[in-house]
Image (cartoon, helix red, strand yellow):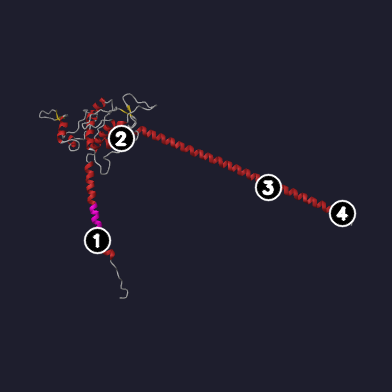
Amino acid sequence: MAGRGVSEPMARVLSRAVRSVLQQRNQVQVEAGVVRALGVNAQQQDTSDAGFWAKGLRGLALVGAGATGLLGLASVAYADEAEHGLAAPQYPWSHNGVLSGYDHASIRRGHQVFQQVCAACHSASLVAYRDLIGVAYTEDEVKCLAAEVEVEDGPNDEGEMYMRPGKPSDHFQNPYPNESAARFANGGAYPPDLSLITKARHDGQNYVYALLLGYREPPAGVSVREGLHYNPYFPGGAIAMPKMLTDGGVEYEDGTPATESQMAKDVVTFLSWAAEPEMDERKLAGAKWIFVLSLALLQAAYYKRFRWAPIKSRKLVFDVVN
């Protein structure tokens, strides 16, 4: 009995010690798990923060690159505009259609504007007076127009040049004897020949029209030297030619109000005809060829149908027995 009584207290002590050790071990494991969890969460938080800031920096870099690109494009566009001039608007010219022709009344008015305004400085040496016959004037009117001009001809029997009245076969005269005289009279600028001006310039008709009506005061920060005039449609923005068209500057023979826009429209129509006088005939010839080729196409289609109909509709029977 005595040995049994001693063993039971010892067993209880041992059991309590074992439970205490197990509790401490479990507590240590729980704390270690919490520490690990906190470490993982902290690492994830650090990683997410780092990723957030990295994404933000990349976004800012993209925005900066886009802004730099836009500023670069704007500067390039501004430099291109300054070098080549402002792009001209698109105007609905009546002769630009596929089957549209020149407005011959406008050609006549445009020639009047050219003769009274433009011919003082510009030439149109590729246009002859006889080219206007049947387009804007009658033959008698052209003879009268040509006779008003003095043309240098010769040599005569004595080997000398002489002046004579113009003839319909003569070309429009140059207002200056040579390029040096033209530059001297225009402050160093050389007025170009206008025979092919609507073909020699990009978007020629719209460019010339916009140029004639584009004179204005220079904007703030833009200075134009003396002797030049600000026009944003001219390359560089400064042109030696002053504004030539003013309301009522020409009195039209047919009574049309001579506004600036009307005169600009008429003279551009005249210059377009001067650069491409065969356009009406070419369009008419093209319409005739299209009509003839359409008839030929219909004939070919009918012949093909007539020729192939018996072949397509025939029935083939195969005698497999014999």
Q: Quadrant of the C terminus?
A: bottom left
Where is residue 291 shown, x and y percent of the image?
A: 23, 50
Q: Disc 3 versus disc 4: distance between alpha carbons?
A: 41 Å
Disc 2 to disc 1, C-alpha distance: 55 Å
Task: Please name the residue that numbered disc 2 is placed on.
Answer: 207
Pointer 3 or 2: first along the chain: 3
Please tell me which of labels 2 and 1 falls first in the chain: 2
Q: Residue at x 24, y 61 (%)?
A: 307
Where does label 1 land, which residue? 306
Report x, y in % for residue 140: 14, 34
Residue 228 location (% of width, % of height):
32, 26
Q: Residue furthest bottom?
A: 322
- Mark 3 falls on what kind of element? helix
Mark 2 secondary-structure assignment:
helix
Q: Residues within 10 Å of mark 2 (few under 14, many from 20)?
A: many
Label at residue 33: 3
Magenta residues (range): 294-304
The kind of residue tagged 2 is: Tyr
Q: Does the magenta-highlighted stretch encompass residue 316?
A: no
